[in-house]
Amino acid sequence: MRRAIEVVMPILLVLFVAGALVPPGEAAEAGREFLKLDLTMAQAGAAQPPAVPPAGAMALSLRDSIALALKNNLDIAVEGFNPNLREQDLTNEKAAFDPSAFLELTRSDNRAASASSFFSGGRALSDLWDFNTGVKQKLPTGGNYELRFNNEYLNTHSTSTGFSSRFAVTLTQPLLKNFGFEATETNIRIATNNQSISREQLRLKVSDIVTQVQNGYFDLIFAIDNLEVQRRSLRLAQELVALNKARVRAGVAAPVEVTQAEAQEAARVQDVILAEKAVRDAEDTLKVVLNLPVGGGWGQEIRPTDTASFEVRPINLDEAIQRALENRFEYKSAKMDIDNKDLSVRLTRNQLLPDLSLTSSLSSNGSAGTYGSDVSDLGSGHFLSYSVGVVLTVPLGNRSAQASYLKAKLTADQARTSLKQLGLQITQQVREAVRRVESDAKRVEANRAARMLAEEQLRVEQRRLEAGVTTTFNVLSFQRDLAAAQANEIRAITDYNKSLANLEKVRGTVLERNRIEM
């Protein structure tokens, strides 16, 4: 029915004219509004970070960081042009079916020697004015039509003056090669798929940026928490120095124990310095991902308002693989690319057929001494002419069409093989991501238990030191063990959150998880 309307409507139109664009916890996510990505803002210029005093700090939540990165990122801005570019390609393909009007005006002045006046040098004169207008259009069926209104005015100067007019409808319709909607709409369908592919590529770019922001944000949280761990370790070392000095003054400890404690204190100072540097490095890494303009936030510290929490999330491996195969942007793009190649196969197969075309025309003619009488004759319908015929063209050899068809088939088979390979890669990535999440969850629990044991061991050893039944060396050893256990715990929690973000990426659900609307 739709095809019939597309065929009939252009003709009716012509007749009428002739007549006249991630924090865990789903419960928390459900209450959040969608983060809308406005590409026009990203393409117009970089977003500005929150206004802060020169010596202040930017307080950023993870969601604020994601929003800032999406507005600032120039890769997204550049990629955002592609859907609009592909839309123009689609419009250009559809424009092949737009009707076109034409207007022709010719004046001919013919001078030829007449037989009666040849020896006397006489001339026969005639003026011909030819005025033609009409409309023509390509049809979705593969054919084309033309409505033409011809008018001629002939003045021979010596014999007569007259007008002749002709209204004609001409239709040419292929019956084999280039016949049907599939042949004519192949380029439109390919352009439509290409536009969808460009949108999936844009979503993939946004997904990558969001994951980068999450990783950078969690790394900054780890660096800040690790700095606090090193500072606590330094305070423990300083407290031990003070305790040993008091024990030396009381005569219950040798001076060497103070030296040992001071050496540990100096080492902890170095650890604090390195941890402070790691915080600044993590800040700069995040600022790069946020694409902050020079002078627009680089002088301020970033203060994360979210924390790297730990909450075990049950994961169904089979469901995760299925969702990845349904949602991964590159997988959907690959399937649409196969659709394009299948369209090319069918089109090139159609080009192997002989070119058999049906031609037909119907015209009404008029001729009289005055223009009014001429048009009256034309409209009376008494002088009708018609023609019907077929034209057959058979290429000899047809090697070019055969080569194009075989190439299209090979390309489609190659794309299907690549899709299978991509499916295997996605499956492997999801399985590895799930194992990483489960492994990191176990690491958090193991490191948490190790940290609690290290705290208890240090408390016991400090009491033994105060009682004089152990040495400073043993206390220092337990202090180092506690600092390492605390760092390992927050590292495991950070890795767990990054693994969850990576799992959403390989499942293709980053935008859905972070409620980003494009």
Image (spheres, grey):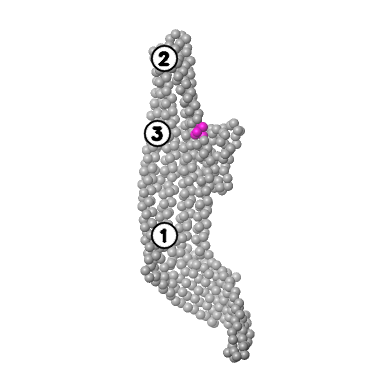
Q: Secondary structure at mark 3?
A: helix
Q: Is residue 37 visible?
A: no
Q: Which residues are magenta?
A: 279-283
Determine which quarter of the picture holds residue 459. top left
Q: Mark 2 or mark 3, which has the lower sequence index?
A: 3
- x and y percent of residue 406 in the render? 37, 61
- The amino acid type found where label 2 is placed reads Leu
Q: Mark 1 or mark 2, which has the lower sequence index?
A: 1
The answer to whether 101 is drawn above or below residue 124 in the figure is above
Residue named by callout 1: 343
Q: Secondary structure at mark 2?
A: helix
Determine which quarter of the picture holds residue 367. bottom right
Q: How far apart are labels 1 and 2 at the CA level?
A: 82 Å
Q: Are marks 2 and 3 in contact (CB under 8 Å)?
A: no
Residue named by callout 2: 465
The answer to whether 424 is drawn above or below residue 158 in the figure is above
- For label 1, count other residues whose C-alpha is less than 10 Å away and answer few (under 14), some (14-19) or many (20+): many
- For label 2, count other residues whose C-alpha is less than 10 Å away and answer few (under 14), some (14-19) or many (20+): many
The answer to whether 111 is drawn above or below residue 482 in the figure is below
Q: Main secondary structure of the magenta part?
A: helix
In-image side of 263 versus 18 (left or right): left
- x and y percent of residue 101 in the render? 56, 69
Residue named by callout 3: 441
Q: How far apart are labels 3 and 1 at the CA level?
A: 48 Å
